[in-house]
Image (cartoon, coloured by chain):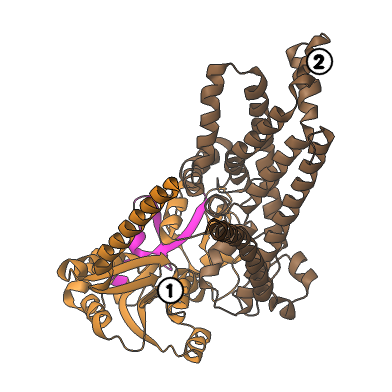
Chain colours: A orange, B brown
Amino acid sequence: MKKTLVMGKIFAALAVMFLMSTLVALPIFAAGKEITIKGSTTVLPIAQIAAEVYMDRNPDVDISVQGGGSGVGIASLIDKTTDIANSSRKIKNKEVEKAKSIGVDPFETVVAMDGIAVIVHPSNIKNYLTKQQIKDIYTGKTSNWSQIGGKDMRIVIISRDTSSGTFEAFENLAIDKERVRPDALTTASNQAVVQTVGQTPGAIGYAGLGYLSRKVKTVSVDGVKCTRETIVDGSYPLARPLYMYTNNAPAGEIKAFIDFVLSEEGQRLVEEEGFVGIR
Amino acid sequence: MTRFRENLYKWIFTILAFASLVFLVGIILTLLKEAFPIFAEIKLFKFLLGSQWYPTYEPPDFGILPLILASVLVTFGAMVVAVPIGVGSALYIHELAGETQRAFLKPIIEILAGIPSIVFGFFGMVIVAPFLQKLLGIPTGLNAFTASLVLGIMATPTVCSISEDALSFVPRSFREASLALGANRWQTLMRVVAPAAGSGISTAIILGIGRAVGETMTVLMVAGGAAVIPKSIFDPVRPMTSTIAAEMGEAVMGSPHYSALFAIALILFLITLVINIIAEIISRRYRLKLGLGR
């Protein structure tokens, strides 16, 4: 009897402590607005830096930014598990239909311009590829670098998985929606592509302009290098807009954040991350 | 008052115990329900034996043979690594190690078991893959071989612990009888103790297989992700688990792609179920054989 009394008291004490800690934690959740942003790994750096600066200025706002790919972002927008969907491709008609059928109305805002650069290992002697060569490589017609003037080495194709907006954009712009050869390696993000290409001598891959680094060598496409200027003047063939989608036109805190991204300061951050502003 | 409290405890614990059953049944029903629609679009055999996996193209192709073969190849490769090291370590720790050696070998193996799979995956992708690529001169280090290697290391603690348990279950009398008849320690170990623990060691291996088949994060990062029937162990592959992980996020709910992924999950579930049932049957048979009853 005495033992159960003591245990009962301990249990009661623990329960009270737990309840109190929950009550203390609640204000942290209740006060302040939350914005969830999910989607494209290409747009991710923009969203992250903008979120950081915005949260500095507005301490009562809490913004969480995640990747996952454009497909994941848009699917989350439709499922209402995110406020803003980052996307490096336009929303598909099927997705719009699905959204509207459950009461979600996707609203598109272009926040930046981006170029998809084609990258190879630094030891690769090729500096220049034509769009046709890129297409032949990715669809499986060309398998060895020596067939297009490079070293005698098997081409290791690095691609992205299907949730990637970069992949979809590349599919549209570079390979005219044909099927990528089945033995292409798939990776989860722009960063992973750069990492893998940088470590694999025979590799070819594609990544957003903002991810280029000394680890890889960028080749020009049809004679045009992937730079800010060529994206702005439209001469680089693999350029595309970057989007943020919201449910209905943005309102409240979401509108304030997107306005910030579109503002002069926000666009300066966009350029700092290596993308092209839209002003 | 006491009778009431006793009954109350009984009911609380009954509910908790049956909670697992509820979860399991829930999972099975969900898998069946969500996977079912894909079989209206494509026959079961074409799904299982089709060799093209292009779920997002128009028209889509849902053949999962490359994925199944990839899982089989990677799991088999993992066992080639895990069984010798795992069973060997178990034999060593059980019979041949001194007290001090045992005192630090066992914890090391437990620690290995506790390392999160993402750490293995990261390590495999950033360190092991480029190293193997340079060492072996292969086009890429992200392939079935590397995945097998890393998975094998991950499955080793499972195989080792359960084998060790099996060995310790063998009655001391077996060992003592063998030594009394003049056999040396090595002969006793290899000819008497190990065979007696044979079924238990088989169980360990089978559970190791179960572990390897279900591993997702590591193969997602290390196996290469190419949905193609592997021609060599150095080809990049895409096991079933990494397919689901990579594509689930963007498959629109209710679409054929979504159902196809659930169908893959269902098949994976059935494989692990069969593996566990076999392990249970063998383990039960071995306990009866050794006279341990039940």
* Residue type indicated by callout 2: Ala
Number of numbered discs overlaid on the protein picture: 2
At x 69%, y 38%, the residue is B80
Rendering coords of residue A83 (x, y %):
35, 78
Residue farthest to the top, as pictured: B182
Within the magenta stretch, is there residue A213? yes
At x 35%, y 69%, the residue is A43
Q: In which quarter of the image is the C terminus of chain A?
A: bottom left
Q: What is the C-alpha distance between the residues marked 1 and 2?
A: 67 Å
Rendering coords of residue B270 (x, y %):
72, 60
Does the image show residue A251? yes
Q: Nearer the viewer, residue A244 or B9?
A: B9
Residue B197: name its quadrant: top right
Please give left or right for residue B29 compared with residue B219 in the image.
Answer: right
Q: Which label is found at residue B177?
A: 2
* Residue type indicated by callout 1: Gly
What's drawn in magenta, residue-wise? Answer: A202-230
Within the magenta stretch, is there residue A270? no
Element at badge 2?
Answer: helix
Rendering coords of residue B256 (x, y %):
64, 78
Marks 1/2 in contact by CB < 8 Å: the verdict is: no
At x 70%, y 76%, the residue is B36
Rendering coords of residue B224 (x, y %):
57, 53
Element at badge 1?
Answer: helix
At x 32%, y 59%, the residue is A16
Please give left or right for residue B22 compared with residue B202 in the image.
Answer: left
Q: How crowded is mark 1: few (under 14 residues within 10 Å), some or many (20 or more)?
A: many
Residue at which label 1 appears: A73
| Chain containing mark 1 | A
